[in-house]
Image (spheres, rainbow, N blue to C red):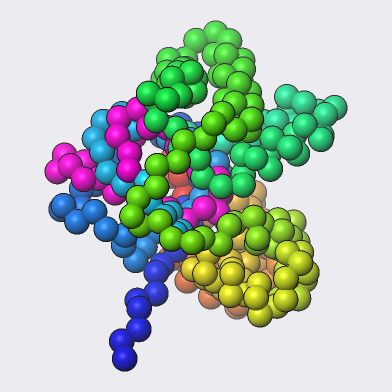
Amino acid sequence: MSSRKKREAEFQYYEIPHGERLLALPNQRVAWDYGNIQESDKRHFHNLLEIGCCISGSGRIFFQSHAIDYGPGMITVIPQNILHETVSRTHTGSRWDYFYINPGDLLREFYPDNPLFVKRILERVNSREQYYPEALHASLASLVRLINDGCKVRADYSGEYIRGLLLALLTAVGNGGAKYEHRTEYEKPREDLCQISGALEYIGTNYMEHIRLKALADACNLSETHFRRLFVAYMHMTPVEYINLVRIKQACTMIERTDCSMEEAAEQAGYTAVSTFNRNFRKIVGTSPYQYRKNSRDRNGKHVL
């Protein structure tokens, strides 16, 4: 009996430039899949919230258990850890403007004395993917375009201008705004990311420590067996594999930004043995920690793990 091919999950790590509030990647081309608009065996997820605006072309975005069709003017809001893949249906490909933000940092900067409001907006923004056709959400599409335009034209006070637009955008998305959902025949019953969000938060806070499966299951109020099944079904990797991704991501940041030794990087990332750190680093990044440091100056703020 043939078994279904296991899907791969690629972690794409983006770093916001120092002193900026977002990372802008304008006019990105989404390749044509030669007419075969089908889900593939490889999707990716990010470490930041992704805001996308389709400039031209059309196609389909595949999520964990459903797909949506897109065209010019479609706005997408995809939180971190949401598996997805964007496919074009035109031979010229489609074009998107993207920018990436850390909504928690931005909202805490805006509302330092109102943590309950920040928590409520973050819960709504990070709960799942959202998508808005321009025809039904012209004001939200206008906000996204103003932010993208502000990133392209630098002027005095442009930082404060973009800051205000980001606040308006996060508030609009966090307040729901009659979310438009155009599902296709690919829609299937889904396990919501919220069911494992407690574990993702726990890993993000405690990656330096030895993390047991029971602690992750308890963070989600699930049994260990049920938790592991949900985690693998959604993330297409085991909890241990995800923990290693988070640890190596943190190690990459240390190696790039400091003069720490590799032993220090390994320890701060949660590894007790340098050999284990080196093995996982090479497996995830594709090179040794030493070579990564040597090459880091040639990078432009984007790191794909």
Q: Residue furthest right?
A: 113
User: Does residue 57 sit above or below 127 in this rendering?
Assistant: above
Determine which quarter of the picture holds residue 211: bottom right
- Does 208 sit left or right of 233 as displayed? right
Q: Was residue 99 drawn as part of the magenta stretch in this picture?
A: no
Quarter holding the N terminus? bottom left
Rendering quarter of residue 52: top left
Q: Where is residue 46 in the image (x, y as percent from the top left)?
A: 51, 50
Q: Residue at x 36, y 62 (%)?
A: 42
Q: Residue at x 57, y 19 (%)?
A: 165
What's drawn in magenta, residue-wise? 69-96
Q: Which of 257 and 98 is in front in this view?
A: 98
Above or below residue 160? Residue 97 is below
Task: Determine the residue located farthest toward the bottom in the rendered image.
Answer: 1
Indicate yes or no whether the magenta region holds residue 86. Answer: yes
- Percent x, y of residue 5: 35, 76
Near-viewer residue (182 or 285): 182
Residue 177 place in picture, x, y as percent: 56, 28
- Residue 265 visible in the shown view: no
At x 16%, y 52%, the residue is: 35
Up the image or down, 288 lies above or below 113; here it is: below
Marker count (numbered): 0
- Give the residue displayed 50% in from the left and 40% down from the top: 130
Q: Which of 211 and 188 is in front in this view?
A: 188
In x, y percent, where is residue 36? Answer: 19, 56
Q: Can residue 220 be seen in this view?
A: yes
